[in-house]
Amino acid sequence: MRSCHYFTEDTRGKTLANYLDDRRLRQVVERNLGMIGEALYRLRTINPETAERIANIYQIIGLRNRLAHGYDDEIDDALIWRTVQESIPIPLSETESLLPPFDAE
């Protein structure tokens, strides 16, 4: 989940209008939401006790499923953007606090 800092860097200073106007930004956001949702799904499967400590985990996994499997004919871009701005930073912070220190060497 440490690579998710790139996710927040990609969206920092951006607006919903930027998101709607930039196809590549939408692709980056949707791809990263997919990866975050998949990682949280796996965590929930492997270690449910730890997963329960992460806010909005079920909503993020559900959003990932909707994006990946096309459960909706049309994705609500405003909902995606609101999720990026409001819902993702909290579990990212919570998840990183649960991980041991990372040594890149």
Image (spheres, rainbow, N blue to C red):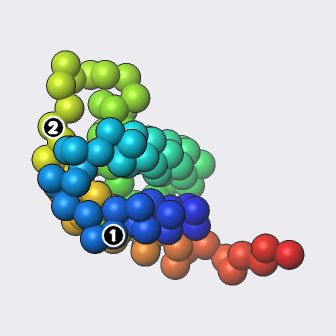
What amino acid does circle 1 point to? Arg
Give 60 or 19, whichever is nearer the viewer. Answer: 19
Residue lying at 43% horizontally and 73% vertically, measured from the top left: 94
Point out residue 28 in the picture as x, y percentages from the top left corner. 43, 46
Residue lying at 35% horizontally and 54% vertically, measured from the top left: 57
Does residue 28 show up?
A: yes
* Mark 2–mark 1 distance (CA, rounded to whole Å): 20 Å
Point out residue 58 in the picture as x, y percentages from the top left corner. 32, 48
The earlier-in-sequence mark between 2 and 1 is: 1
Which residue matches tag 1? 12
Instruction: Choose top left, top right, bottom left or bottom right for residue 63.
Output: top left
Give 22 or 4, whichever is nearer the viewer. Answer: 22
Q: Say which element carries label 1.
A: loop
Say whether residue 76 is left or right of residue 33: left
Say whether residue 75 is left or right of residue 4: left
Q: Is residue 57 above or below residue 11?
A: above
Find out whether the residues at labels 2 and 1 contact each other: C-beta distance under 8 Å: no
Which residue matches tag 2? 76
Give 39 or 7, whichever is nearer the viewer. Answer: 7
Instruction: Choose top left, top right, bottom left or bottom right for residue 55.
Output: bottom left
Q: Say which element carries label 2.
A: loop
> In which quadrant will I find the N terminus?
bottom right
> In which quadrant will I find the C terminus?
bottom right
Circle 2 Cα neighbour tier, 10 Å, few/some/many (<14 / 14–19 / ≥20): few
Residue furthest right as drawn: 105
